[in-house]
Image (cartoon, helix red, strand yellow):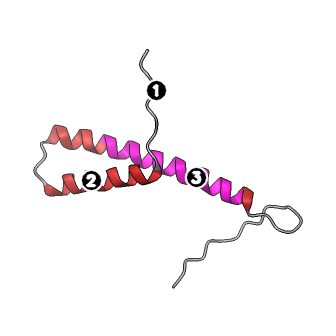
Amino acid sequence: MGQKQEKPTLETAMQRITEIVSEMEEGSLPLETLIVRYEEGVGLVKICQEKLNAAEKKIQIISRDARGAVELNDFEEQGT
């Protein structure tokens, strides 16, 4: 059996998504290549979502009040 390929880091996945978007926006790729790039991008987006969800869960575990209970607060963007 083949070896299981490691998932890229969030940063690597996001960089590759940026590259794919740039290639697709150029408009010079044949349809078959566009489809392959699109499928790759969708897979990378899924990996990013999984990593962000996992990070959010870790933050919730770390964010506890003085009694040890999880304290969930709405995220407030800076400068809005």
The magenta stretch spans which residues?
Answer: 39-60
Precedes in sequence: disc 2 or disc 3: 2
Q: Quadrant of residue 42?
A: top left
User: Given this view, does label 3 or label 1 mark the residue nearer the observer?
Assistant: 1
Instruction: Give the left or right position of residue 4, taking residue 25 as reference.
Output: right
- The answer to whether 20 is drawn above or below residue 72 in the figure is above
What is the three-letter code of the residue carrying label 2? Glu
Q: Residue furthest top?
A: 1
Q: For the stretch drawn in magenta, what is the main secondary structure? A: helix
The quarter of the picture where residue 57 lies is bottom right
Give the residue number, with chain letter if any, for mark 3: 53
Q: Amino acid at mark 3?
A: Asn
The answer to which of 10 and 76 lies nearer the viewer is 10
Which residue carries the number 2 mark? Answer: 19
Q: CA distance from mark 3 to mark 1?
A: 22 Å
Judged from the image, the secondary structure of the residue bearing numbered disc 3 is helix
* Residue to which mark 1 is pinned: 4
36, 2: nearer the viewer: 2
Verify CB contact (< 8 Å) between mark 2 and mark 3. Answer: no
The x, y position of residue 58, in whole percent, is 67, 54
Q: Is residue 63 above or below residue 30?
A: below
Is residue 61 toward the left or the right of residue 35 in the image? right
Q: Residue drawn 58% across and 52% down?
A: 53
In percent of width and height, residue 66 lies at: 86, 69
- Report the quarter where the N terminus lies: top left
